[in-house]
């Protein structure tokens, strides 16, 4: 029996000393525990790329810390996803939950501002993005996503999350 697809993390514009393996292991943990085995792809890049994606897909001409693209995302977002789908013959829509894009620069600045390390901030952003891929929306769900994020952060040993920061 073939092994199920694994979540992937693609790094671009990230310093060499950033703990990539730790982030990749965290993505697999999120896949197994939060997403119940369903894979997703994460793209960690710079502000310019997040600004371009935010403008192109959401009409917002500014960089942001994290974006989520449910379902089959554009090939320009995640070349790893496209390569995996074409080499395995997987052309089924929804083969992954979707793609998450994270700005490393925003993660680093937010980590400094909130007193933890950049790796932890990337993990917080990845969890937040994954909850969006799972259909949650903190803008419209009467606190459901905030409660889920808080519960998962505690379970995963992460510091204060995005929604909680905005509300404090």
Image (spheres, helix red, strand yellow):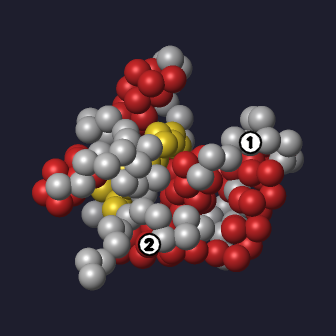
Looking at this view, name the residue that lies furthest to the left.
Answer: 87
Q: Quadrant of residue 24?
A: bottom left
C-alpha distance separating marks 1 and 2: 24 Å
Q: Nearest the camera: 120 or 78?
A: 78
Q: Residues within 10 Å of mark 2 (few under 14, many from 20)?
A: many
Dot 2: element: helix
Image x and y of residue 93, in percent: 36, 45
**Quarter of the image with the N terminus in it:** bottom left
Q: Nearer the viewer, residue 6 or 89?
A: 89
* Residue 20 can be seen, yes or no: no
From the viewer's perspective, is 88 left or right of 109? left
Q: Secondary structure at mark 1?
A: loop
**Residue 6 visible in the snapshot:** yes
The residue under label 1 is 138
**Mark number, residue 41:** none
Q: Residue at x 70, y 76 (%)?
A: 155
Left or right placement of residue 126 versus residue 40 in this view: right
Task: From the top left corner, tell me how far across and down residue 129 is, in percent.
Answer: 56, 50
Q: How many marks?
A: 2
Name which quarter of the figure residue 114 lies in.
Answer: bottom right
Which mark sits nearer the N-terminus, 1 or 2?
2
Q: Residue at x 58, y 59 (%)?
A: 127
Q: Residue at x 50, y 17 (%)?
A: 59
Q: Residue 16 appears at what percent x and percent y?
A: 28, 63
Comparing 116 with 120, the one in front is: 120
Residue occupied by mark 2: 28
46 w.r.t. 83: above or below: above
């Amino acid at each position: 029996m073939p092994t199920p697809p694994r979540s992937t993390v693609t790094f671009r514009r990230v310093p060499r000393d950033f703990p990539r393996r730790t982030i990749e292991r965290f993505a697999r943990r999120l896949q197994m525990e939060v997403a119940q085995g369903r894979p997703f792809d994460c793209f960690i890049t710079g502000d310019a790329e997040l600004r371009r994606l935010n403008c192109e897909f959401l009409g917002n001409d500014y960089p942001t810390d994290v974006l989520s693209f449910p379902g089959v995302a554009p090939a320009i977002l995640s070349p790893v996803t496209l390569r995996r789908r074409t080499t395995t013959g997987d052309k089924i829509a929804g083969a992954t939950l979707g793609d998450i894009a994270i700005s490393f620069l925003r993660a680093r600045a937010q980590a400094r501002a909130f007193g933890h390390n950049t790796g932890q901030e990337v993990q917080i952003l990845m969890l937040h993005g994954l909850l969006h891929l799972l259909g949650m929306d903190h803008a419209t769900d009467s606190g459901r996503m905030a409660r889920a994020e808080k519960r998962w952060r505690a379970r995963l040993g992460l510091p204060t999350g995005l929604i909680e920061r905005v509300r404090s």
